[in-house]
Image: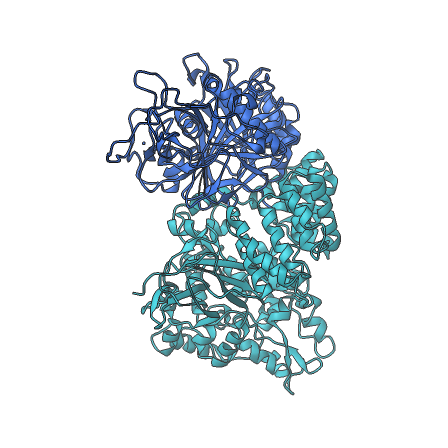
Amino acid sequence: MRPLLAVLVCLGAPAYAADPQARFGPPEAARRLLGPGGPDAATVRANVERDGFHAGEPIGEGACARCHPQVVDQWAASAHRFASFDNPYYRAAFDVFRAERGAEASRFCADCHDPALVAAGVIEVDAPIDVGTPAAQAGIGCRLCHSVHAEPDARGNAGYHADIRGLGLPDRHAAAVASPTLRTARLCGTCHMVGLTEQVLGDTWMRGQDEFTAWYDSTANGHGVSAVWRPAAPPRTCQGCHMPREAALPDEKGAKDGTIASHRFLGANSALPHLRGDADHLARTRAFLEGVVTAALHTPTPGVVDVVLRNRKAAHRFPGGTQDSNEVWLHVQACDDEARVLGESGAVAADGRRDAEAALIRAQPIDGEGKPIQRRAAQHTRAGGFDNGLLPNEARAFRYALPEGTTVVRARLLYRQFDKDYVDFACETVPPGPTRDRCLDPPTIVVADVEVPVRDGRVPPTDDWADLVDYGVALARGLAEHAEAAKAPLDRARALAPDRPEPALAWGRVLARTGQTDALFAHLAAGPAKDHPAADWLRLNAALSAYRHAPAREAAERLAERFPDDRRTLGLLARTRNLTDDPAGALEAADRLLITFPEDEEGLRQRLLALRTLGRDTAAAEATWLRHRRDVARDQRLRQLDPRIAAESVPLRLRSLSPPG
Amino acid sequence: MKRTPIALLALALAAPAAAQAFCGFFVSGADADLYNDASQVVLMRKGNRTVMSMSNTYKGPTKDFAMVVPVPTVLQKEDVKTLPADVFDHIDQLSAPRLVEYWEKDPCWREPKRRMRKMAGALPRPSSAPPRTERDAELGVTVEAQFTAGEYQIVILSATQANGLDTWLRENKYVIPEGASKALAPYIADGMKFFVAKVDITKVKRDAEGTVVLSPLRFSFESDTLRLPVRLGLLNAKGQQDLLVYVLHPEKRFEVANYPNVFIPSNVEVLDKVRHSFGAFYVSLFDRTLAKAGGRAVVTEYAWQTSSCDPCPVPPLQPADLMTLGGDLLGVGPPGAIRTKKRRRPSGPFFGPASSWVLTRLHTRYSADTLDEDLVFREAKPITGGRASGYGRSVEEAGEVRDAPSNNFQGRYIIRHYWKGKVACENPIYDRWGGPPSGSAGGGTSAATGLATAPRGKVKLNDVVRSKLPALDVPGKPTPKR
């Protein structure tokens, strides 16, 4: 498969970039994307006119439902089904994008969200979309994923080819609809890895939402070379978490060993089941999110509290998905002995608007004026504003000054899929009535909740060594001039758990950040962290920062031997080989990286440097690198235009708790 | 690993024995000796933003020359500012080690009651990158931006090969030092850009002796790490180089995280003859302090609020000075709020407004053997040292540094004229110091500047220091008898 990928990368965009229907094969095949069964067109249109969307009997899955009723039932409640114009939150953003960027460019959305419309040849026609048709209300149906046989394009952006065959009954059914690709993360990455292209942004390329890369880099994929925590759980793909095995019903013919892969695709999509009044799916979503992030409180200095969040379960960043719309924030309250709120941050006003000063937990894209992207308008993205998201198994802290007289502090991590401004905008297409009321009021989910007493400005210290490690990790992420504040909690963690590598690794991060290279090497020369992968990652990065290229390369080579496909390792392996006069080796490492991640900036740069040193033609390599090179100067310039964005980009800044009202 | 975006690297060109530049290398249009007196950088830091100003004194042939400095991002014209040259003089003199002189009061004098009185303390057009020539492409060099700022003609280059950049500079008539390619390679691998500031010699200012005085340059960037690369500055060094780093922060003193930190011994009493060779004395003290730290350390010479000083060789920094050094970008306050028209030299302390910044002065002298990694800075606890109390006594013992709620640390060196007159009272009170007796000259405070070129090894510390400094093996001398 790899040589094929290499060819695809070299050739540039897939053929269906030009001819969208070609991804589905010949026209007669495209028409099979939507199978038989489901309500008639008039019923669909009537539902759309009544509710704004069709949520009744699924469209086009009758043939599948005959043998797989349980699977189809689960899918029928999922976000994959409600991904197209049967989703008012999507429809509103799509309409604006299409009006601004044109029909052809709107395929950027439609290739993933509206495959039935793409297959029908509707999207690229410069005319309004008739949202009342079955194709517009079908969502992402069974046949799309179950027709992907070839490994999708490594650049995501709907780089799939749906080889829509017949059902292959009775004896070639599995071969027809259940290729090995179905079980790979790359299949999910074809839509859950996004590059905002020049057609979308107008003048540049930027990385968009990307669950695939975060998962790929994590311990969940068996990588996680920098991770302090290496959970014992075996590697798992997206399907492992989002399609867990469930007990099969007697009439479900797709069961293996009495179970099926869940097709509920549970994640964080809470607005859609609420919109439809699907209490069961919403309850399952809440349960899915339980414990995904934990919160703990610590005292750095009297009168100040650090809220430490750790992503415990998501094998990609938390929150995932569309960063500009997922509203995840901290609600912190400081109370007195009589439970009066002395100060708080993150309250929600009576009109449903969240406190604008609240700590938002997400990556925030900004536009050309430095303002947060509004209304899901990805086409306005020009830079990254701040990034408070939580990588897999990583911790981050948010710091608050406690008012005088505080005796209790409570911190809750709250999640609401869309903020007030967005739902006001998006729900316009839903006619007035109970459905619209639900549209305007997506549920708020409490993801984490902690409350502790405060005495003399301090919260009770903890003897949980793992909590102390998380705190140290979070402090180490602050400005480097403050990073050594992690010493006290990490010393305590080490005293409580002397045989664990995690406290030593976390301290190693501090030493690396503060340039204490010799101390780092000495620190990791012995002890429980010595042979941990993260120890070599720290050695590699510290040695590079200190211009010690030979030991940096040694560490990189060791890591590459353990993790031959790790993205970040390969990038730095290429760099260290370039720096130790081995351009051929650098080129080999870069090319290996670029097979899986053809847009990786480090890989592209090191490849270019190697080619130049080898005296080869670099025009194409340079053009590709320049296309994907992040414009750091522009990021920095735009971030400074909005004081809130600029402030939020400072890690671990001190926040205030305002008196209520 | 993304290298933290502070890359001011200076390579001084082949030069005579004088100390070399640090942050960026000087190149000339001819194979000429270029050198720099002292390397000074101001880092104004707030949150994750840093404004860096670098001072470039230059002595050399009166021909066009340039300097090459790696920078983290493509800088546009509006990002680069030239500063008035005297702002560095001011910060240097304010924070430099100071020599003070006292006369002992008549031990029989009794102080009259009195009230204490407080003593008197460009958006230009966006630049455009010129079209890339074929030759630039062959060399893997891209001119990302091009503009002028004061006497500088600036191009921002990116490169994909160290040899290519080397060749480009040479072909564009810059003579660069041997070994530059290898030194530039890590920055190219990290994706850094190169700030090439060519100086138009017809536009420079000169001092009274005709020496070229280049305008300091300033630019800003974001970074979660406060780091200063020093490596490139060693390329053409002959021996050791001096580096002075001034860190300005709203609240905190700074020190270096990845090298040993030491304090310059302060409140040191010295003999009268030091007045004629203060610079030479100080460098001897500095060199011994550094040697005792293994030759590989950064010396804290000053840490004090910018709004006050005691004593004050020059007035404290004004809000306008802070704006010049980056406050306009970091939100110091309204520009020009208070500005003295002349820089008077007050004779006493100055206590300014409560809100101000903390100025830390860090000094090191280094070679490739002693300092080969970037300096990474961290916040440090407030300290006091080198303070005077009423009557010119020293609050801290010689060499003593104390933890404190706020920073008041300076290098203070004291000449004392002990009472030689009659003692005509029963209970004489000694150790009260003040200005010169009426009719005599002297007194005041002088700052040690130009330390990089002060003669070294000329003053024997043990001969001129009266205070005991056991950490430096200075036995001290007895106090004269009264």
Q: Residue at x 70, y 35 (%)?
A: A616
The percent coordinates of residue A580 (x first, y second) are 72, 37
**Colour for chain B in the figure:** blue
- Above or below: residue B90 compared with residue A62: above
Give the quadrant of residue B347.
Answer: top left
The percent coordinates of residue B339 (x first, y second) are 29, 31
Q: Residue at x 38, y 72 (%)?
A: A441
**Colour for chain A in the figure:** cyan
Horizontal side of A98 relative to A156 (left or right) equals left
Horizontal side of A443 relative to A592 (left or right) equals left
- Above or below: residue A339 compared with residue A298: below
Q: Residue at x 42, y 46 (%)?
A: B405
Q: Nearer the viewer, residue B107 or B337?
A: B107
Which quarter shows the C terminus of chain B? top left
- The residue most toward the front is B426
Give the quadrant of residue A72.
Answer: bottom right
- The residue most toward the bottom is A250
Q: Which of A373 and B329 is in front in this view?
A: B329
In the rendered image, is residue B37 in sight?
no
Q: Which of A417 and A65 is in front in this view?
A: A417
